[in-house]
Image: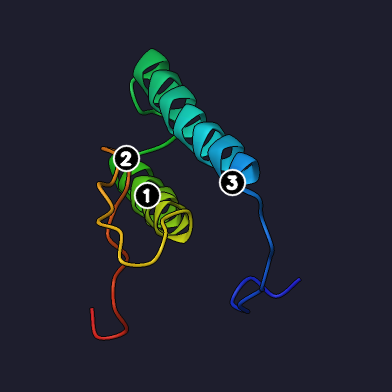
Amino acid sequence: MNPDAAYDVKLSGYDLIMLLAGLKAYLQAFAQHRELDGGTTHPDDQWRHLQRHVGELIWRLEDAGAGPDTLVIHSDEAVEPRTEEQ
């Protein structure tokens, strides 16, 4: 698998809900792990990178589940994806 390649996937609304819940739980578990070890195994820069990457994925999944012409109110964990210029 090429980590830089884009892939097309068909997901049901239920699939989106499950993926979003899993990603949010992953962020919570990672934060708890960092708290327990004082950030020793995962320094701040690694944590920020993970939050951004997973947050952008959450944002895209939330957008994907919205209907056309729908105003999306993103979750607290969602991070607006960077554009190519950023």
Please name the amino acid that badge 2 sits on. Glu
Mark closer to the chain start, 2 or 1: 1
In the visual, does 25 lie left or right of 52? Answer: right
Q: Which one is in front in this view, the residue at disc 2 or the one at disc 3? A: 3
Q: Secondary structure at mark 2?
A: loop
- For this rendering, which residue is in front, 21 or 54? 21
What residue would you read off at disc 2?
A: 77
Mark closer to the chain start, 1 or 3: 3
Mark closer to the chain start, 2 or 3: 3
What residue would you read off at disc 3?
A: 13
What residue would you read off at disc 1?
A: 55
Q: Quadrant of the N terminus?
A: bottom right
Q: Quadrant of the C terminus?
A: bottom left
Q: CA distance from mark 1 to mark 3?
A: 19 Å
Neighbor class of circle 1 (other Cα within 10 Å; few <14, some 14-19, many 20+) is many
Q: CA distance from mark 2 to mark 3?
A: 19 Å
For this orientation, the residue located farthest to the top is 36
Neighbor class of circle 3 (other Cα within 10 Å; few <14, some 14-19, many 20+) is few
Q: Position of residue 47 (x, y in %)?
A: 36, 41
